[in-house]
């Protein structure tokens, strides 16, 4: 374990939305090479670490990342050369200090994360360990939360809520879980076609049909689960990502089907009705990212019945999660590495959640690359749940397929998390 970082190279590549992102190749003195690239969100939270974009309107409408790439080459590489890739926390501390800002806006969270994860991958490879073993050696295959219908900023089709998802809670292995999901996805397409509705795909590979409201989307999912031969709720449960920050304006929630606006109480009432009427086991971002009062109300009303999951609320940030834990707000955290910008801080959030009894859902972004790091992260840390998008598109399948490989490698040791991973009862 004496190998040190001997070279770092960065480049601009394109993500699944055709937008630029940062990719890093990192070499060790023993000849090991590792590659890593970072994702990017569409419905980003205000409190996320900043990804640096060039702002040059002549290239990619300002979305180029040449500045972030230059920061890797000119500032980060010289500072990490000669350092140990095995001391992840120390390495990430160097990155954080080099940037020096609270939100990583100086060098860019995209520049920092690509180096941070490439170093971990190189260290694993140099040790002769699969990445998931190196990241903690967990044996738990996560319960996938899989997008079937998209709305919000991901589909532009009229549905205010962003994700309508299915969870194969009663499958007995990850492989079987994906078979069930594929069957429900096929059944959904058949139903949509039968009604003359669009099966065009949204950003994460889910369907984006024009539907009048969340009830119509949930009815469709219940029907599709049954058509696929599974019991809605008992075998395949439902979840929603409301992504409420994106229809919160001037103090009120304004989903397309409530144009006059609702206060937090009105939206919580509505979510409670959905939980009463459908086999929903998880609600993500039911309220806006800074509506702590509303979140308190939601947690009181529904936190004993379903998973209350904070994405834009917590932004994978230990300070924000700490505030939530202290206030009894939510009972689960979404974990997106690029919301915080280093692997060490991500692992810190997972540990903090675990200690507090909060469930952890490792998550992809709407803009992804072929990088499959999060599959290993979820298993290695035994996070219990993963959210990757739909069962479509190579940037999503890269992660699902890596989980299939890990399950195979684990053999008899593998354990599929299933329903037990869900808060509040898991
Ligand atoms: P994003 O969406 O990657 O566009 O932020 C994912 C989510 O909200 O969970
Ligand atoms: Zn979300």
Image (cartoon, helix red, strand yellow):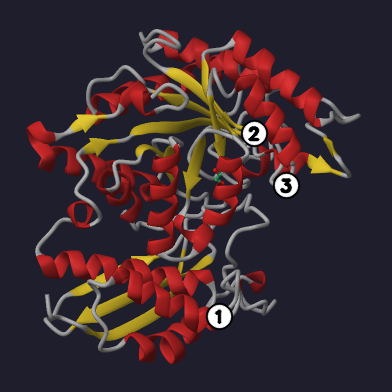
Residue under the image location 33 percent in, 21 percent down: 180
The image quadrant of residue 143 is top left
Q: Is residue 270 left or right of residue 372?
A: right
Residue under the image location 16 percent in, 34 percent down: 414
Q: Nearer the viewer, mark 1 or mark 2?
A: 1
Residue under the image location 60 percent in, 69 percent down: 103
- Nearer the N terminus, badge 3 or badge 1? 1
Does the closest atom of ligand 2 sit within 8 Å of the Cβ of label 3?
A: no
Q: Which residue lies under the disc numbered 1?
A: 100
Which numbered disc covers residue 282?
A: none
**Residue 160 position (above or below residue 79):** above
| Rendered location of residue 333, percent (x, y) | 50, 41
Residue under the image location 84 percent in, 30 percent down: 263
Question: Circle 2: is it few (<14), some (14-19), or many (20+) Cα within 10 Å?
Answer: many
Q: Visible in this render: residue 268?
A: yes
- Nearer the N terminus, badge 1 or badge 2? 1
Q: Which residue lies under the disc numbered 2?
A: 242
Q: Is residue 189 left or right of residue 324?
A: left
Q: Which residue lies under the disc numbered 3?
A: 290
């Amino acid at each position: 374990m004496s190998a040190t970082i001997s070279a770092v190279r960065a480049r601009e590549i394109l993500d699944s939305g055709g937008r630029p992102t940062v990719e890093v190749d990192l070499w060790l003195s023993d000849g090991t090479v590792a590659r890593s690239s970072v994702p990017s969100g569409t419905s980003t939270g205000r409190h996320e670490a900043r990804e640096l974009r060039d702002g040059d309107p002549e290239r990619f409408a300002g979305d180029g990342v040449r500045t972030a790439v230059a920061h890797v080459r000119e500032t980060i590489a010289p500072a990490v050369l000669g350092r140990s890739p095995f001391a992840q926390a120390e390495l990430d501390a160097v990155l954080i200090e080099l940037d020096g800002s609270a939100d990583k806006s100086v060098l860019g969270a995209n520049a920092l994360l690509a180096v941070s994860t490439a170093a971990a991958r190189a260290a694993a490879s140099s040790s002769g360990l699969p990445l998931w073993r190196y990241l903690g050696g967990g044996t738990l295959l996560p319960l996938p939360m899989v997008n079937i219908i998209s709305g919000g900023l991901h589909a532009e089709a009229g549905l205010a809520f962003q994700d309508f998802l299915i969870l194969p809670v009663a499958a007995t292995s990850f492989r079987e879980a994906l078979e069930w999901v594929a069957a429900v996805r096929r059944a959904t397409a058949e139903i949509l076609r039968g009604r003359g509705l669009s099966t065009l795909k949204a950003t994460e590979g889910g369907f984006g049909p024009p539907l009048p409201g969340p009830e119509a989307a949930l009815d469709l999912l219940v029907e599709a689960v049954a058509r696929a031969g599974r019991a809605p709720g008992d075998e395949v449960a439902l979840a929603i990502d409301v992504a409420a920050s994106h229809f919160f304006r001037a103090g009120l929630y304004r989903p397309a089907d409530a144009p006059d606006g609702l206060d937090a109480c009105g939206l919580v009432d509505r979510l409670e009705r959905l939980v009463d009427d459908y086999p929903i086991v998880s609600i993500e971002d039911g309220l806006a990212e800074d509506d702590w009062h509303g979140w308190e109300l939601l947690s009181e009303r529904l936190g004993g019945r379903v998973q209350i999951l904070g994405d834009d609320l917590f932004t994978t940030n230990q300070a924000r999660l700490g505030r939530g834990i202290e206030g009894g707000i939510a009972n689960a955290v979404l974990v997106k590495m690029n919301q915080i910008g280093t692997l060490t801080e991500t692992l810190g959030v997972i540990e903090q959640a675990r200690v507090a009894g909060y469930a952890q859902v490792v998550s992809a972004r709407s803009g992804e690359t072929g990088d499959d790091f999060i599959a290993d992260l979820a298993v290695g840390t035994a996070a219990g749940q993963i959210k990757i998008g739909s069962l479509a598109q190579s940037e999503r399948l890269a992660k699902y397929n890596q989980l299939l490989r890990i399950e195979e490698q684990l053999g008899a040791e593998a354990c599929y998390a299933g329903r037990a991973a869900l808060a509040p009862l898991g």
